[in-house]
Image: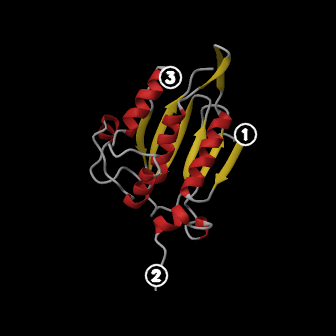
Amino acid sequence: MRHPTVAGLLLFGREPQRFLPYAYVTAARIPGEDPSGEPSDRKRIEGTLFQILKDTSRFLRLHLPVSHQIKGFEPEAHPELPERALREVVVNALVHRDYTLSAPIRVFVLDDRIEIRSPGTLPNTVTVDMVKAGMAHVLRNPQLYTFFLKAGYVTDTGNGFRRVIRDVKQAIGREPDIRIEGNESVVSIPRRPS
């Protein structure tokens, strides 16, 4: 008898959280700089990984300001943080998290930063410095990665976080940070001071 794979459920399953109850994102807008503060908005984001990516991106756009400038006859939108960088970090959390850990991905929109906490430390001998330098291309979940690659959400170069660093630094003059805390990989993207 055939059984669905974890990747199959996450990518194509109807109600994947019925079978993988921890495979979701908790997103919260928390005023202030402390993630343990009281959220002004909170959302549990479920569905396939592609639906989770879409809804998490929507949550981030909802809570990040966009300025507008007139160029010629048309207004031009300028989000506070580059959407490509935010998408890359969310995709990395979805594709590279450790699905053997019974914990969700957590996304915090704070006054001074965006924090994305993904279950699992870095795989094998990968270090934070290797990730920052673009020298690590180890796949924890190769089937998930392959589908996101074919859908155009990732490249096959291992330079995603280097692009995030470059894009964020160009936008606000400061670099994002990646670190390991306990059983989580944490990416912290600074925001513009208010």
Tell me the distance, in whole angstroms, between the alpha carbons under discs 2 and 1: 45 Å
Give the residue at the far front of this rendering: 73
* Label 3 element class: helix
Could one spot residue 36 in this view of the protein?
Answer: no
Which mark is first along the chain, 1 or 2?
A: 2
Amino acid type of the residue tagged 1 in the rendering: Ser
Could one spot residue 32 in this view of the protein?
Answer: yes
Establish if 93 lies above or below 86: below
Q: Nearer the viewer, mark 2 or mark 1?
A: 2
Q: Nearer the viewer, mark 3 or mark 2?
A: 2
Tell me the distance, in whole angstroms, between the alpha carbons under discs 1 and 3: 26 Å
Q: Nearer the viewer, mark 1 or mark 3?
A: 3
Residue 175 placement: quadrant: top left
As drawn, the label of residue 40 is 1
Does residue 122 appear left or right of residue 81 in this picture?
Answer: left
Amino acid type of the residue tagged 3 in the rendering: Ala
In the picture, which quadrant includes the C terminus? top right
User: Label 3, on which residue?
Assistant: 171
> Residue sitting at 48 percent across and 47 percent down?
91
